[in-house]
Image (cartoon, rainbow, N blue to C red):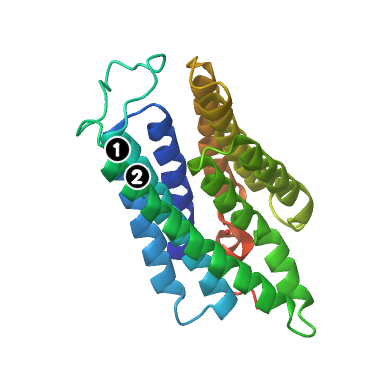
Amino acid sequence: MVLVWLETASFLSWVVKDFSWVLLIPETAWVALLCALIFESWDIQNHWKVADRYDLAGRFVLLLWILGNGTWMSSELLYENPSKNITFPWFQGALLGPRTYVDRELKVLAGSFWALALLLGICTQMLGRSQQDGRALRSRLNADLWVIFWVLKDFFWLLALPWNALACSVIIFYCLIDLRPSTEPKVLTAALISWLCGNTLWLVGELLLADTSVLPRALTCICLIGSFGLGIKNFFEQEEPEARNILPKSMGTVNHGKL
């Protein structure tokens, strides 16, 4: 039950981090980021001796993803002023003032974390699919393929390439709808899709609409609240505690044979 709680807490921390970031609330954003990092690291430690190498590799992809995402978030909150159209009474501007050089260096670091995540994820997919008689493993890898494209989407977003990022969002949606096993809880899939929709709305508002309106961020928050609620619902809806799992298949339970 501890592992199940860790996986759920990790996912919910990610959602709270995004919710806080989109509303420019640094305090809760960094607390949620720290919680996600702790839960992910703790989860890896708990699975270290019982999970196979593909399972562990998937967990390290998650950890690298959140490290890069948190670095990017920190660079924006600390050193970037938001658009003049995006104003909140609790956020008056970059906490340490605009510093282009430091901001750029932190974004390079974020991209480096994602490059490692992509390299590890792609290698895991290639090695796993090369195994003979590995139908179950390939099914797991298919179910986890969306993680690689989400990391790639964030990478394109960081580089301000909106159409590339949106193309990745479409692929992620396909992976969540078509490649996840039919045995996966529908509520879990709905939680991930709601998270994706919110993330994509935020992307459109920031890159294509140049943050000319706060509406995309408001819609993003609605999607994230829905994702949070669905994540909790998925945890309590399963009949057996062992079946409760919020993360992707190969990042979930240990007996697979985890984005």
In front of the other: 252 or 86: 86
**Of 175 and 126, the residue lying toward us:** 126
Name the residue tied to disc 1.
100
Q: Amino acid at mark 1?
A: Thr
Q: Quadrant of residue 191?
A: top right
Tag 1 secondary structure: helix
Quick one: which residue is furthest to the left in this view? 96
Q: Is residue 149 above or below residue 140?
A: above
- Location of the C terminus (image quadrant): bottom right
Would residue 252 be visible to someone looking at this image? no
As drawn, is 213 to the left or to the right of 32? right
The answer to whether 67 is drawn above or below residue 194 in the figure is: below
Q: Is residue 151 left or right of residue 107?
A: right
Q: Secondary structure at mark 2?
A: helix
Residue pictured at 53% horizontal, 41% vertical:
157
The reply to whether the C-beta atoms of the residues labelled 1 and 2 are less than 8 Å apart is yes
Residue in view at x 33 percent, y 17 percent: 88
Residue located 42% across and 66% down the image: 43
Identify residue for label 2.
Answer: 104
